[in-house]
């Protein structure tokens, strides 16, 4: 794709994006995003395709065959290939100071797959799923595929309001409801980019333990830390069995690999290992997981993460500078210390949904804030911008266009 060319996948849930021009073939046609020349789409939470490690993955896939032979192409072990699980266990121990036992980790087909699986295994029809708000809107879609009642839990700049959460859980239980899980993104949140404070982490873990609620911690962005280390995961600080932490190679390697992992209590991992899907199909994405295993074992992971971090940090800084230079007064956006996104609060009276068509006419797009609230009650004064897909000069041009749209709406 030429730089400056903009992309548009299915509106806001751009999961079908394929950015490299490939030979035209009608079976591939639904892999291609419609191109929208002239629009910078800062709504897309995607890596820059120019940064994806094509050569290293090509080498690793050959290595996977050379090293593991027919195992690379067979049905996989239910909790994923040992080489990848072992590499991950030791890296987690080194980075987080807690070594998951071999029966406390499972390889997954990415966070989306793992979330779907956990919801299948850990909830019953009619259960309440507590959902941090704002939160990753497509996780909400996964939760909505089940007959669950979703309840939004307001998050602030420091994390969840633990007292309000505690009261709500009490009230739900008194009404005979069964709150069975809490879905949250405590580190470099999508959409806000913010991290929960340490006290909030500990208080939420203690509350969940007391109330016997499974915390599903979506840890997609842990590797992309731009200003020092990421805070400890909830899984790191919780007693065994309280947290299922979902990790992914989507942001630290490539989303097309469809490989991630769960660290959780051994009872839950045993349920994952023995569930029907694994019994029938074996571990997810065997060849991709073997390829990722070879890639990681050969030392390719850390340099690639460093490349993402360096590039995205510069893009974050460029976008923040451009917003400060060009947007009309009255907006606010905390600088995210990691992840993909900046959460912009608009000047009073300006609605992001009203702004969107005007912005698109100016040649810039974003995701309106309301989409990140599972009850639809919030976010109209905010919008999410991704800074990963475009280089600094184009981010600046996007900010100029956004500013122009805001002036037209005021
Ligand atoms: C918070 C969050 N969780 C999960 C995902 C998707 O993860 P995966 O590609 O591993 O399914 C994303 C991708 O945008 C995300 O932002």
Image (spheres, rainbow, N blue to C red):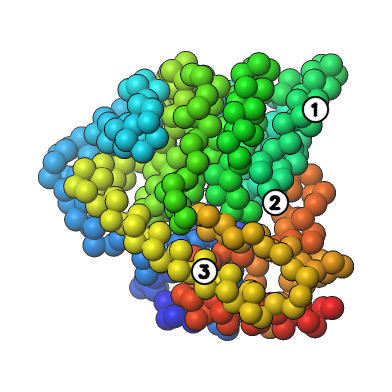
Q: Badge 2 local density, few (<14 within 10 Å), some, or many (20+)?
A: many
354 displayed left or right of 266? right
- Confirm if mark 2 falls within 8 A of ligand 1: no
Residue at which label 1 appears? 168
Q: Which residue is mark 2?
A: 372
For mark 3, does the 10 Å Cα neighbourhood hold few (<14), some (14 to 19), or many (20 or more) residues? some
- Nearer the observer, 173 or 116: 173
> As displayed, is residue 10 above or below residue 4?
above
Expressed as whole percent of the image width and height from the top left, the position of residue 321 reads 57, 74
Q: What's the distance in space between the residues labelled 3 and 2, CA to CA?
A: 24 Å
- Compared to residue 307, the image places residue 151 above or below, namely above
Residue 364 figure quarter:
bottom right
Residue carrying label 3: 317
Residue visible at 24% across and 52% down? 300
Q: Residue at x 78, y 82 (%)?
A: 407
The mark nearer the N terminus, 1 or 3, is 1
Whether label 2 touches label 1, CB < 8 Å: no
Which element type, helix, strand or loop, lies under badge 3?
Answer: helix
N-terminal of the pair, mark 2 or mark 1, is 1
Q: Quadrant of the C terminus?
A: bottom right
Crowding near the residue tagged with mark 1, few <14, some 14–19, many ≥20 C-alpha atoms within 10 Å = some
Q: Earlier in the sequence, mark 3 or mark 2?
A: 3
Residue at image x 34%, y 57%? 306
């Amino acid at each position: 794709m030429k730089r400056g060319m903009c992309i548009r996948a299915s509106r806001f849930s751009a999961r079908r994006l394929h950015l490299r021009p490939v030979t035209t073939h009608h079976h591939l046609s639904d892999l291609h995003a419609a191109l929208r020349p002239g629009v910078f789409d800062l709504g897309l939470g995607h890596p820059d395709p120019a940064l994806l490690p094509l050569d290293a993955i090509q080498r690793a896939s050959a290595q996977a065959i050379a090293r593991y032979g027919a195992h690379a192409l067979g049905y996989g072990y239910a909790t994923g290939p040992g080489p990848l699980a072992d590499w991950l266990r030791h890296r987690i121990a080194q980075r987080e100071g807690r070594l998951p036992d071999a029966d406390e980790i499972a390889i997954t087909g990415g966070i989306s797959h793992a979330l779907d699986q956990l919801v299948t295994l850990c909830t019953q029809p009619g259960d309440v799923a507590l959902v941090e708000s704002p939160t990753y809107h497509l996780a909400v879609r996964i939760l909505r595929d089940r007959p669950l009642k979703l309840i939004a839990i307001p998050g602030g700049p420091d994390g969840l309001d633990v007292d309000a959460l505690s009261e709500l859980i009490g009230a739900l239980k008194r009404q005979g409801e069964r709150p069975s899980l809490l879905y949250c993104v405590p580190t470099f949140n999508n959409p806000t980019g913010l991290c929960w404070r340490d006290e909030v982490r500990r208080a939420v873990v203690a509350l969940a333990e007391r109330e016997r609620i499974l915390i599903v911690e979506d840890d997609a962005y842990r590797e992309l830390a731009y200003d020092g280390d990421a805070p400890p995961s909830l899984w790191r600080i919780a007693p065994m069995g309280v947290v299922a932490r979902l990790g992914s190679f989507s942001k630290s390697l490539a989303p097309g690999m469809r490989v991630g992992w769960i660290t959780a209590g051994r009872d839950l991992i045993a349920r994952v290992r023995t569930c029907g899907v694994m019994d029938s199909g074996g571990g997810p994405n065997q060849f991709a997981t073997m390829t990722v295993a070879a890639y990681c074992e050969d030392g390719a992971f850390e340099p690639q993460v460093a490349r993402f971090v360096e590039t995205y940090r510069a893009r974050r800084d460029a976008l923040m500078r451009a917003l400060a230079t060009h947007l009309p007064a009255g907006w606010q956006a905390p600088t995210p210390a990691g992840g993909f996104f900046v959460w912009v609060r608009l000047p009073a009276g300006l609605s992001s949904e009203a702004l969107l068509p005007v912005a698109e006419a100016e040649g810039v797009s974003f995701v309106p804030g309301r989409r990140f609230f599972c009850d639809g009650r919030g976010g109209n004064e905010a919008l999410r911008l991704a800074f990963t897909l475009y280089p600094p000069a184009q981010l600046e041009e996007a900010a100029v266009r956004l500013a122009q749209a805001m002036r037209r709406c005021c």
